[in-house]
Amino acid sequence: MFDILGLSNNLKNVLYGKVFDEDNYDHGGRKCVESMSFQFRLIVTLLTSLVYYSLYKYRFKNLQIEINSNLKSIEESSLLEKFFGWTSISVFFIIFVYKVISHQLIFMLNPCHLTILIQAYLLINQNKLTQQIIYVMMMNNIFSPLVGIVFSQTTGMHLPLEICMFWIEHFLAGIINPLILSLSERYYSNKTLSFQNHLLAHSYFGILMRLILFPMSWITDANINNTLCAAAHDPFAKILGKWYYTLSDLYIFACAEIINKAIKIILDVFRKLKFIVCMFLFNQPKDDHKSS
């Protein structure tokens, strides 16, 4: 007879069997869960989700109109884009295997892993309307892998080359892939990193956090993207205290907006030198200058 209970236990073991570690409080567990009451989390989740959905719905329609009016042609990706696209998929798959072996597969839902998979999709495919919208959302959410570089969290990584793959993934997702996608100029670049588009991407990210990651974290006690308790390496955690779940969204948005401005300046510098960059990296130099 088919052992449903055994299968369920094996699945749980692979997903989050070794997530909990007394030395790594912020990985999850009852202490992490009990840092805030369920009622408080539920109220915050419902209210912020409503706000995020309203902002997302309003801006999304305008973004579609803007992209449609600026979309000139559908282009195939270059060989360089395809190379980094398939490299990113390979890195994602290797880390996926690491998480299966370490019984922490549920952490593959963290934004950094999802970001590199989305970037691979954009690098390999044509620049149609759907991909254009995804590109805008992705560019305004690369704050996550960049934070992973600055405040790296490699505790619990003991498998061969696992930490090395962590760094490769974050440098790909936070620096290399966004730079290649932007310089290829296949994607919408008219105010990509504008405040309005950042607000849209942040709203989408907030909905993902509140309505998908938080319920899964609550059910499993796994602290997916710090939806249960603050990250131990977060310098604002002690300052915000129990309000971390609410106010962290605001300071993350503010920090990400500053980073977006810095990225825009860097990309503008690269575009001024694109006649050199394109000569070596892409099919041909492109004459039009676009602003992110």
Image: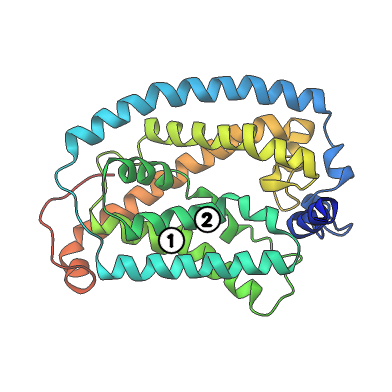
Residue in the image at 57% along x and 39% along y? 252
Q: Quadrant of residue 215?
A: top right
Cβ–Cβ under 8 Å for marks 1 and 2: yes
Residue in the image at 13% along x and 64% along y? 285
* Left-right relation of 34 to 288: right
Considering only order in the chain, which callout, 2 or 1, is on the residue closer to the N terminus? 2
Quadrant in which the C terminus appears: top left
Residue 224's spot in the image, x, y percent?
Answer: 69, 47
* Left-right relation of 149 to 59: right
* Pointer 1 residue: 175
Q: In this view, does 27 lie above or below 92?
A: above
| Residue 196 vs residue 86, the one in the foreground | 86
Q: For mark 1, give the secondary structure.
A: helix
Residue in the image at 64% along x and 19% along y? 47
Q: Look at the image and name its color scheme.
A: rainbow
The span from disc 1 to disc 2 (Cα, nearest Å) is 8 Å
Q: Quadrant of residue 95?
A: bottom right
* Left-right relation of 266 to 169: left
What amino acid type is highlighted by mark number 2? Leu
| Residue 235 visible in the displayed image | no
Q: Report crowding for label 1: few under 14, some 14 to 19, many 20 or more residues within 10 A (C-alpha).
A: some
Q: Give the label on residue 146, or none.
A: 2
Residue 177's spot in the image, x, y percent?
Answer: 39, 61
